[in-house]
Amino acid sequence: MKFPFPLPFSFRIASLKSGLFWRTFFLLGALTTTSMTAWVGMISVVQHEPQVQQISSQVISVVTITHAALTHSAPELRRELLLDLVSNEGIRVLTLEDDDLVDPPADNALMPDIEKLVKAKLGEDTRFSSKVNGVSGFWVSFKIDDDDYWLMLERERIRGLTGIQWVGWASVVSVVSLLGAAFISSLINLPLRRLTQATRAFAQGKRPDPLPEKGPIEIMEANRSFNQMVDDLQQVESDRAVILAGISHDLRTPLARMQLEVEMANLSNDAREGIQSDIGQMDAIIGQFLDYARPTEASSFVNVDVSELLRDTAHEAGRIPELRVSTDIADDAHVMGNATDLKRVINNLIENARRYGRTPGGDATEIDIKCAVKGTHANKRVVIEVQDHGSGVPDDQIDQLLKPFTRLDTARGQANGAGLGLAIVERVLQRHGAELNVSNRDGGGLLIQIAMKGL
């Protein structure tokens, strides 16, 4: 069993990383990123040559047309032509001077191939620059007669020289892909989360709402099977209650007749006491069966004052001559539960200690009952301990104690009963969402510890 209170932060983080939602999300995200990277790489390779051809042709055409326009225009009209090129076409033509401050051309995958094609058409002495005298643009040199000139094209007209647009589009696609991965992961995880919550509620003794029988066929079949299982188990519980009521009546009625007949029969005191003892044991065994099978409904849980319950139980046990009960019970220990069932748990533990926990060589059984409240308000736990001072149990046989119909006679002495005492304890505590821990006590004896969520 597990603690019902909040888990440590590190454990929650580990669960988050290993959850189905995040695994699906990361797998879809990785797949999308890999696909997008491959797509961008493929597009870059495929369009490299056409883009180089397009940009080179554009640069060659602009330089050639500008060269022809300046060569064939009248000298007095050249200034007006240059102003028109700047204002209408975004083309600037300047005289190339030896003292010009020239930056190298843009460093990208296209530029070397562009330079090669342009130089093949305009001449090997053609120069390129990304900035001349502090002015950014796509600069290329050309000659008119013996004079050198700079021609500048605005960068907007030369597409594909930078990867900014690719990065922008890739970012948009990545965000959209991750949102899609989160949405798909939620759709996949939602039915499983519903099933988990319903299973947890059913394990705590509650009847969960029927799961929706729709969606993918696998989810639909799983939900339908779970709903059918809940209905079947509820029917089994109902049938078992009827059967147990019949067993209680059919067996205890003849036992009561036998008890009456023994009282009225002409028997010796030893024979009468022996038969009465056997009848009492049979009645106790029937009671154990009923306690083990009796369901504990979560709807019956109320605020139980564990401190008061333990004090009352210890006081009642202290009346038994062969028991010596010592207590160390904290005040204001409260839990949600069924007070009758919790008292039955403590009584079973005390009876178990009385039968099997007698101090070696002693004339009585010593039992220690402790209760402590641990943790903060949001993570409060009530820890109950019942321990005896007997011979204990071999460590390799402790797990056997909680199994129904099991008695470790060789370790704990000869026993009467069905061997359901600790099995009943575990069954009741499991329905209360508590943890049961059985171990050997330091100094001898058995230590039984119960941890429950406190209020």
Image (cartoon, rainbow, N blue to C red):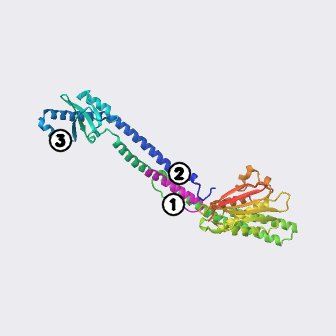
Instruction: Assign the magenta stretch its main secondary structure.
Output: helix
Residue 83: which disc?
Answer: 3
**Count the marks: how many?**
3
State the separation of the CA atoms marked 3 and 2: 66 Å
In the displayed structure, would residue 333 be above or below residue 108? below
32 horizontally vs 260: left or right: left
The residue singled out by tag 2 in the image is 16
Residue at the image position 76 percent from the left and 62 percent from the top? 368
Local crowd at mark 1 within 10 Å, few (<14), some, or many (≥20)?
A: some
Residue neighbourhood size for the residue with mark 3, other residues' Cα within 10 Å, grouped as few (<14), some (14–19), many (≥20): some
Tell me, yes or no, whether the two marked residues, 3 and 2, touch with CB atoms within 8 Å. no
* Identity, as a three-letter code, of the amino acid under mark 1: Pro
Label drawn at residue 280:
none
| Closer to the camera in the image, 328 or 1 | 328
Q: x, y percentage for residue 1?
A: 64, 56
Among the 4 quarters of the image, the one containing residue 76: top left
- Front residue of this view, candidates 256 and 454: 454
Q: Quadrant of residue 153?
A: top left
Q: Secondary structure at mark 1?
A: loop
In this picture, which residue range is highlighted in magenta?
182-211
- For the residues labelled 2 and 1, the Cα–Cα distance comes to 27 Å
Pair 2/1: label in front? 2
Amino acid type of disc 2? Leu
Label 1 vs label 3: CA separation? 80 Å
Q: Which residue is mark 1?
A: 210
Badge 2 marks a residue whose secondary structure is helix
Instruction: Assess whether residue 422 is covered by the magenta stretch.
Output: no
Q: Is residue 184 magenta?
A: yes
Helix, strand or loop at disc 3?
Answer: helix
